[in-house]
Amino acid sequence: MGTALIYDEEMTKYKLLWVDPACKIEVPERLSVSYEALVRTGLSDRCVSVPPREASDAEILLVHSEEYLEGVKKTPHMTLEDLKEFTLQYGDVYFHPNIYHCAKLAAGSALQLVDSVMTGKVRNGMALVRPPGHHSMRSAASGFCVFNNVAIAARYAKQKHGAERVLIVDWDIHHGQGVQYCFEDDPSVLYFSWHRYERQKFWPNLRESDYDSVGKGSGAGFNVNVPWNEVGMENSDYLSVFCHVLLPVAYEFCPDLVLVCAGFDSAIGDPEGEMCATPDIFAHLTHLLMNLAGGKLCAVLEGGYNLTSLAQSVCQTVQTLLGDPLPQLANLRSPCESALESLQCVRSVQRRYWSILKHAADSATTDVSNKRIKLAKAEEEKAETAEDERSQEEKVWPEPAERLRPPVCSASVLPDDAACPDGLKRLVSSKDLGPLLVSRIRNRSMEDAGDADGVATFSRLYTLIEKMRTNEIGNGVALVPDVAAAVECVVQDLGSDLVSRVLVVCVGKEELNYATADGKMLVVQISGEDKEEQKGKYYIPVCLKKGCGDTVGFIQAVFGLLLPLGYEYDPGLVLLVRMPGSGVGDCMWQQLIGLLKGFAKGHTLVLMQTNDGACMGPTASALLGHPAPPLQELLTPLPDDGGALERMRERLQADWKMLQTTVSSGN
Ligand SMILES: CC(O)(O)NCCCCNCCCN
Ligand SMILES: [Zn+2]
């Protein structure tokens, strides 16, 4: 299934008709440069073009009041003076004779997108619209927004398509207060927003934008605000919030549909956000949401005012929706102290509503946060005096790297008698191995039938890894007689010279004794076995007391440990090993493969034992990029095994900065 793209140049046909410094950044070119970039890169041709339509009155009234709609309806016939007069009653927004028409098209585009996704015409999609929507309220325009496009889409998805749970992820740098007000007492719509806040000093300066606004009544826990109290947030800050807050909660919520308030003013160069995250971060943010709701994801444009970073961010998002390999994120750092304080505060208030966060640490003790405020003020004074306030427009960042789709998406290495799943390319050619390697293999404890096919299998493995390195093949799966021996061969003989860093993810118990001290390999083993303490920084045994069939524990290990570690380690290859008898569920296994694609440009090699061939189907489906089915088990989580994972994370964070979720008690 494809990716929908909704755009119509009609939505560029309104603009600011008078002087208003607060509104001059919202220009028609925002839409045209975004669309032109998609055309220039060839991405628009790969999408399913879906036309917008005007939202009807009834659809607009799903969110807005009749008196508000009646008022907006009058604007097309207003004189310039009347338009100015009408605008004065609202904040940071402007009207134009054609904006009512465009606002109906913007809302209607979001509805077209929901129809296309919910009816299965496409898997996911993006609507390039203006005016944006997430600030507009029941009876008020605000922040360049007239109708709340995404809020209307959420209500529409429930009413027309029977969606029971809708997740709204708002990565725009402003707080979508309009969305929060609309759903704050509604447990069927989970609203997540991060936003520049600066302790209420940043627009819209609302007390209710802070982290302690968690929703009201039966909606308590279904509103998640992450305030950024400083500018300059980077990729690692954004990824930490996704791994340690949004994704665990989103998976426990188990939505039927994901709507994204896709504002790109959170990217570097934007005059509003003043953040430092690079456009390729949106490739990863999109990817991390794509295994929710069976892949049903609708991204609707909100803000974004630096035309260069906006266009790049839009392309990164659409390219991920199309299933292309992800870019490697360069040199992630540790989340900054301010981000950690926000992270700790959010997790501490949300832990009472989400069992998956139950063991999160308590909120930053008041003296720590007071100290931080003093520190922040001191830094602020210093900053203002010292550095020249370089404007955001002069910021420079590297052009996002090309993301080339390999000629072969997925390959397989199988015993001759095993059937090859549809879509996978069976590797038969076996690269001739040097005599040294062959002798090593023969010596290896490959006690399978006749080591001839052992050598053949191994040489095909070698070929597969080689072809992933050259990007001729995206990912692959190998069924081998003895998975432990095969892992040993691959990591000992191949990993080192073929790729610089190999992330080995082992699911299930098995003694894995590899020399991992040199950092060429990071081994994360998730099993039910209670291992002795981990051996050094690069071998991390994660013990799930109830075994790998414990989906809550497993998903906590994935988001709380595996993903942050993977982002920090930044491997060139991922080796996913399924030990026999691991007990991991098929859905969890597919989710894991889907999520691991975010690393190493999607170069994942799955190793499984021949007699484990039963899960070849789900494995192949995930490798080919089909969305993993939802993890229903998370809906009614059993009590988990206590804070073992949390304690392990705290212990490891000294070595691995991306595991941090609390301010360092040091300073
Ligand atoms: C969709 C959106 O979230 O990007 N709208 C942002 C509105 C910002 C209003 N304040 C402008 C002040 C100018 N310095
Ligand atoms: Zn914004």
Image: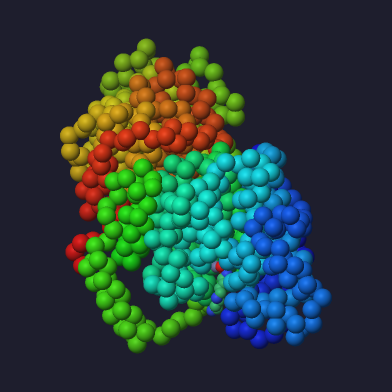
- Taking the spot 61% from the left edge, 51% from the top edge, the residue there is 154
- Does residue 222 appear anywhere in the picture? no
Residue 646 percent location from the top left of the image: 27, 45
On screen, residue 150 versus residue 544, left or right, reads: right
Quadrant placement of the C terminus: bottom left
Q: Quadrant of the N terminus?
A: top right
> Quick check: can you spot residue 664?
yes
Q: Position of residue 471 (x, y in %)?
A: 51, 43
Q: Which residue is pictured at 45% across the width and 66% down the height? A: 208
Q: Residue placed farthest to the right in the image?
A: 77
The quarter holding residue 579 reads top left
Compared to residue 612, the image places residue 244 above or below, namely below
Front residue (pair 517, 265): 265
From the viewer's perspective, tell me whether residue 512 is left or right of residue 614.
left
Is 132 in front, or is 590? 132
Q: Quadrant of ligand 2?
A: bottom right
Between residues 48 and 161, which one lies in front from this camera angle?
A: 161
Residue depicted at 42% across the width and 34% down the height: 636
Residue 111: horizontal and vertical position, in percent? Answer: 69, 51
Q: Is residue 616 above or below residue 367?
A: above
Q: Residue at x 75, y 67 (%)?
A: 70
Q: How many marks?
A: 0
The residue nearer to you, when weighing 555 against 278, is 555
Image location (x, y in percent) of residue 64 = 66, 61
Q: In the displayed structure, would residue 412 be above or below residue 83?
A: above
